[in-house]
Amino acid sequence: MVMVRDDTARALAHRLATEQSERRLPSIAAGLVRDGNQIWFDSAGEVDGVPPTDETQYRCGSISKTFVAVEVMRLRDEGLVSLSDLIGKHLPEVTELHSTVAQLLSHTSGLRAESAGPWWERTPGIAFQSLLETSVRSVDVLERPGRRFHYSNTGYAILGELVARLRGRPWDEVADEELLRPLGMLRTTTRPVQPHSKGFGVHPHADVVLSEPEHDALSMAPAGQLWTTIGDLCRWSAVLAGLRPEVLSPQTAAEMREPQAVNDLPGLPWTTAHGLGLQLFNRGGTRSYGHNGSMPGWLAILRIDAGSGPESGSGSGDAVAILLNATSGLGPTLESDLLSILASYEPRQPEAWRPTPGGLTSELLEITGVWYWGTSGFVLSINREGLLDLHALGLGREAAFRPVGDGSFVGLSGYYTGETLRVVRRPDFSISHLDIGSFVLTRVPYDPTVAIPGGVDESGWAGGATERTPRARRRSTPRGKD
């Protein structure tokens, strides 16, 4: 295993120990991942009198939802379910819910947040039929499906049942067979297996602790049942980053981290959103994704740094996993601090520049360079993956385009996602202009030789800011004086 340097490890250990001491946490464990491989582990505090290792189990709470979401997306990729399906198509008992599979994944179903009855996280679980009768009725839909983000643990109980119905066995058995064992995540289970932590509530005004209960959540288990370790969470981060294609394709992993619903707080820029089973974070334009977890007695964080800009979420970012056994108390910056220390002490080495293997065709090279949409300038270039990059002069990328084989290109990001870029040629095969979804881009602003929608004033450009009338229609006497 490639590990961080000693000075990096000391800085990381100090930050982790400071968190445990100042926040009064019984124990905390953390790991860092680079390029899909765990490169650091440390812990502070004790579990049963000894420091926790990267194989010590903690409850990971809602990080469990990411496993359910991956199971659903694998079903989608196999053609067994569509994200646009109403959930009642597959679970006839919930036809009162007019919510799609995608809305359940993204917490936009409108369904209530928690199950009815006693606090489900601290009491024995109930069977799915009882959940249906008490918590999944038309009266339990609090919002029009799709209207806004509303976190719903109950929604993930339904998704867990969806997986069970379509696979013919419980969701956790599906996870064990299709995800955990192939990935070597043998310390991730639905109930604790020694060595494991005990959950505590730390008194807010005294240095004493209270044991928290732990039960089988049964029907609500898909929302937060799993126990795991730092070692296993580090392995799981590679799946969410799209680095384990045998389990989840990179394209599907990227789709899961596309924003579906923003957690909108009036008067504030968005800082958190939700994709298809993943939480998304935006800190001053720097994006990350993953999931947080919380159960009485335990907290968990899995965060993957996606970088900044439209290319963020490439799956190559560093990742951090954190597990601790306290109901509350974790500070708001530990995960970002650990990632920042790694980036500061051991920045990623830039990839060496090399010419494109095999070169490029003259037809592709011919369309590169500066183009104008009206008076707005853009640069069209070709990246190493053979994609066209369109960006405004002096600004970042606006969109990327992929060739589709007939001389046209389809947009992959930004405003032009899904739109077609066509190269329009004159009879002599020279390039006239580019057409992107009816927008005409020319080599010079408002090229008079191109049929630009709305026409181009034939009198041309002129100085001053006064309104001008085309010569052919200019009047010799004031209106009304003929």
Image (spheres, rainbow, N blue to C red):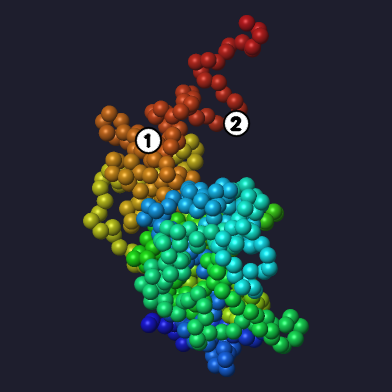
- Toward the viewer: 431 or 208? 208
Q: Is residue 31 visible?
A: no
Vertical comparison of 288 with 78: above or below = below
Element type where label 1 sits in the image: strand
Displayed quadrant of residue 154: bottom right
**Residue 456 - label:** none
According to the picture, the residue beneath numbered tag 1 turns out to be: 433
- Amino acid type, callout 2: Ala
Displayed quadrant of residue 274: bottom right
Question: Residue 462, image x and y in percent?
Answer: 52, 29
The span from disc 1 to disc 2 (Cα, nearest Å) is 28 Å
Would you call the spot at circle 1 few (<14 residues within 10 Å), some (14-19), or many (20 or more)?
many
Question: Residue 86, image x and y in percent?
Answer: 51, 48
**Residue 465 - label:** 2
Question: Residue 385, image x and y in percent?
Answer: 33, 56
Of circles 1 and 2, the one toward us is 1
Q: How many marks?
A: 2
Judged left or right of residue 463, residue 481 is right
Q: Please give the name of the residue rendered at 72% of the width and 88% of the height, measured from the top-left corner.
A: 207
Q: Please give the name of the residue rendered at 66% of the width and 62% of the height, measured from the top-left corner.
A: 116
Would you call the spot at circle 2 few (<14 residues within 10 Å), some (14-19), or many (20 or more)?
few
Question: Residue 482, image x and y in percent?
Answer: 63, 5
Judged left or right of residue 183, residue 44 is right
Element type where label 2 sits in the image: loop
Q: Is residue 208 visible?
A: yes
Q: Please give the name of the residue rendered at 65% of the width and 54% of the height, measured from the top-left corner.
A: 140
Q: Please give the name of the residue rendered at 63% of the width and 71% of the height, measured from the top-left corner.
A: 121
Q: Residue furthest left?
A: 358
- Amino acid type, callout 1: His
